[in-house]
Image: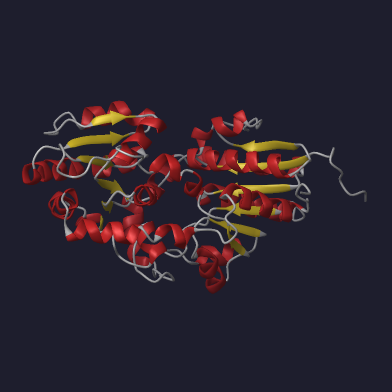
């Protein structure tokens, strides 16, 4: 068999299950094209960013962008058909590599079936599910169909080694390539005491998350304003939820400025003094931006009832759902789950962060250790590190320097 030369296309089948995966996939493709001479040809499932990179998605991303068992059950017939369609397309295409990006409820089912029907196709997983928090058995199951797992959190390779997961390598978190847009420049974040403090409110990027948190968040904001005085409140929202959020925040005593673009969101992060946020990647964004926070989350009703049936394994040095806490090994950010996420508790933890308090200073000191904890040893951008790993699994070589 003749080895591929620089004119032989590198066929990459990417399955991204939601917008964040689409963004991650597009950055991966850009880096693949930057480090190999071979033309990169795309197929699979993605959104607007992968479409701009040349992928023709098998179906709209919205068909599979669901979260929580209740939502999955409601969309089950569509999801089953989309899994079948994706697997069939991958088996027919016989790509050089399949890259499954996040969204494990969908992508893992696709990966298992591809491995069964076409075991010679290499499969890369990009972003580990949170096996370090719960459902640890997923790690061993992934080992059956994932040839290489690209971790975006530095402790995850150790977790997968411990749990019998697939070969796993830390490639860096994509936020490391965007620190410049998160951290304030000179004069962007006013010192506390010079005008009303800016409070960010981030109830989530999915409708179900927003509906479970928005009322308690509003009551917490009201209590904080009553305690500390006037605040400027900014609420970054994904565009398709903006109208609903406007309706749900009309009764708030301080009308939040609702921003919907990435640029507006990043500008708010650079100006903010504190935040009240749903658990998720946004907590890491806030920490890297130097914004002290309180984090809350309410589980999907069915997951909440099943939570007691799962033996939660904490491989990290702390027991936490907040990414900055896990990465630095310290419970610096207060967190409130389910019934604990009541407005009074949230307000009591949030108010000190809007003053020059020990609580604020403690979080900022912890955040100062994130850069070192997340840094790649060779200083490469995460998307380049990920692209090199994908090329290796695909049996391709990077461009010679």
The image shows residue 370 at horizontal and vertical percentages of: 41, 59
Residue at horizontal 60 percent and vertical 54 percent from the top: 125
Q: Nearer the viewer, residue 165 or 3?
A: 3
Residue 321, can we see it? Answer: no
The image shows residue 18 at horizontal and vertical percentages of: 50, 40
Residue at horizontal 64 percent and vertical 48 percent from the top: 99
Q: Nearer the viewer, residue 200 or 188?
A: 188
Colour scheme of the rendered structure: secondary structure
Q: Quadrant of residue 183?
A: top left
393 lies left or right of 309: right
70 lies left or right of 45: left
Residue 292, can we see it? Answer: yes
Residue 70 vs 232, above or below: the answer is below
94 lies left or right of 367: right
Q: Nearer the viewer, residue 60 or 36?
A: 36
Q: Quadrant of residue 357?
A: bottom left
The image shows residue 88 at horizontal and vertical percentages of: 69, 41
Residue 163 vs 146, above or below: the answer is below
Residue farthest to the top, as pictured: 243
């Amino acid at each position: 068999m003749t080895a591929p030369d620089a004119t032989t296309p590198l066929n990459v089948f990417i399955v991204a299950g939601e917008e964040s995966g689409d963004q991650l996939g597009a950055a991966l493709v850009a880096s693949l094209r930057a480090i190999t001479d071979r033309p990169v040809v795309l197929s699979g499932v993605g959104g607007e960013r992968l479409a701009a990179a040349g992928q023709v998605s098998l179906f709209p991303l919205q068909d599979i962008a669901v979260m929580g068992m209740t939502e999955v059950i409601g969309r089950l017939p569509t999801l089953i058909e989309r899994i079948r369609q994706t697997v069939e397309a991958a088996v027919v295409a016989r790509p050089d590599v399949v890259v499954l990006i996040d969204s494990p409820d969908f992508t893992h089912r696709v990966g298992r079936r591809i491995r069964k029907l076409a075991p010679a196709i290499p499969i890369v997983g990009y972003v580990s599910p949170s096996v370090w928090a719960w459902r640890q058995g997923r790690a061993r199951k992934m080992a059956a169909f994932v040839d290489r797992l690209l971790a975006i959190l530095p402790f995850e390779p150790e977790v997968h080694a411990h749990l019998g997961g697939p070969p796993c390598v830390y490639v860096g978190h994509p936020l490391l390539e965007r620190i410049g847009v998160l951290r304030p420049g000179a004069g962007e974040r006013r010192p506390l005491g010079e005008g009303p403090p800016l409070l960010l409110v981030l109830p989530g990027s999915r409708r179900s998350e927003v509906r479970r948190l928005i009322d308690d968040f509003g009551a917490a904001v009201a209590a904080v304003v009553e305690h500390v005085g006037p605040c400027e409140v900014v609420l970054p929202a994904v565009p398709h939820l903006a109208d609903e959020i406007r309706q749900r925040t009309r009764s708030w005593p301080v009308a939040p400025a609702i921003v919907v673009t990435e640029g507006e969101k990043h500008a708010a992060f650079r100006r903010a003094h504190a935040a009240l946020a749903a658990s998720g990647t946004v907590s890491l964004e806030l920490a890297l931006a130097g914004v002290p926070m309180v984090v809350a989350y309410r589980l999907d009703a069915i997951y909440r009832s099943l939570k007691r049936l799962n033996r939660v394994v904490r491989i990290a040095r702390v027991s936490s759902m907040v990414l900055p806490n896990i990465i630095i090994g310290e419970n610096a950010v207060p967190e409130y789950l389910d019934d604990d996420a009541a407005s009074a508790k949230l307000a009591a933890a949030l108010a000190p962060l809007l003053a020059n308090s020990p609580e604020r200073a403690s979080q900022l000191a912890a955040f100062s250790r994130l850069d070192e904890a997340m840094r790649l040893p060779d200083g490469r951008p995460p998307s380049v590190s990920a692209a090199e790993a994908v090329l290796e699994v695909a049996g391709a070589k990077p461009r010679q320097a």
